[in-house]
Image (spheres, rainbow, N blue to C red):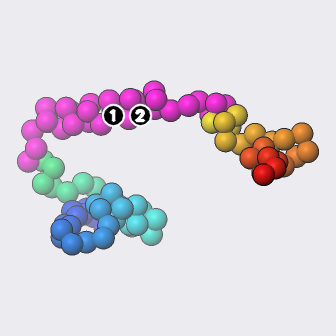
C-alpha cells in the first residue's frame, strides 16, 4: 500500500482511529503519506503537531507513575495472593 485515506460513513461502528489500529494490526502499513497532505500549509501542520504533543503531555502529567500504578492496583498480600483477592467478605 503506497498511501491511504479513510472515509467514514456516519453509520459506521468504528471510528477512524479504530480502523488505523485494525490496519496496523494486519501489518498494512503505508509506504508514504497521502498527497492531499501537501495541500495543508506547513504552519498549520506544525500547529496541529504541537497541539497533539500538548494533549499527550497533559495526559501523561495526570497519570500515576509506573510505581504508583503498581502500588495501587497490583499489590500482593504476604500470602502471595493479590491484595484485593485476599480481602474476606
Which residue sits at x=89%, y=39%? 78
The answer to whether residue 52 is above or below residue 84 is: above
Q: At 18% across and 38% down in the image, what residue appears?
A: 45
Q: Which residues are magenta?
A: 39-68
Q: Position of residue 56 (x, y in %)?
A: 38, 35
Callout 1: 10 Å neighbours few (<14), some, many (20+)?
few
Q: Where residue 7 appears, x then y in whole percent?
A: 19, 66
At numbered mark 1, what does the secondary structure look like: helix, strand or loop?
A: helix
Report the residue that reaches farthest toward the right.
79
In-image side of 25 versus 84 (left or right): left
Q: Examine the structure image and report whether residue 32 is included in the region drawn in magenta.
A: no
63 in magenta: yes
Residue 28 % position (x, y): 39, 67
- Residue 55 is tagged as 1
Pick the quarter of the image with the N terminus: bottom left
Whether residue 30 can be seen here = no
Identify the residue position indicated by label 2 in the image: 59
Amino acid at each position: 500500500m503506497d498511501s491511504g485515506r479513510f472515509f467514514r460513513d456516519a453509520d459506521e461502528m468504528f471510528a477512524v482511529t479504530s480502523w488505523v489500529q485494525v490496519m496496523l494490526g494486519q501489518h498494512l502499513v503505508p509506504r508514504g503519506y497521502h498527497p492531499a497532505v501537501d495541500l495543508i500549509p506547513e504552519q498549520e501542520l506544525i500547529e496541529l503537531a504541537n497541539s497533539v504533543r500538548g494533549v499527550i503531555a497533559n495526559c501523561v502529567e495526570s497519570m500515576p507513575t509506573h510505581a504508583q500504578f503498581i502500588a495501587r492496583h497490583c499489590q500482593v498480600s504476604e500470602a502471595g495472593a493479590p491484595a484485593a483477592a485476599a480481602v474476606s467478605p
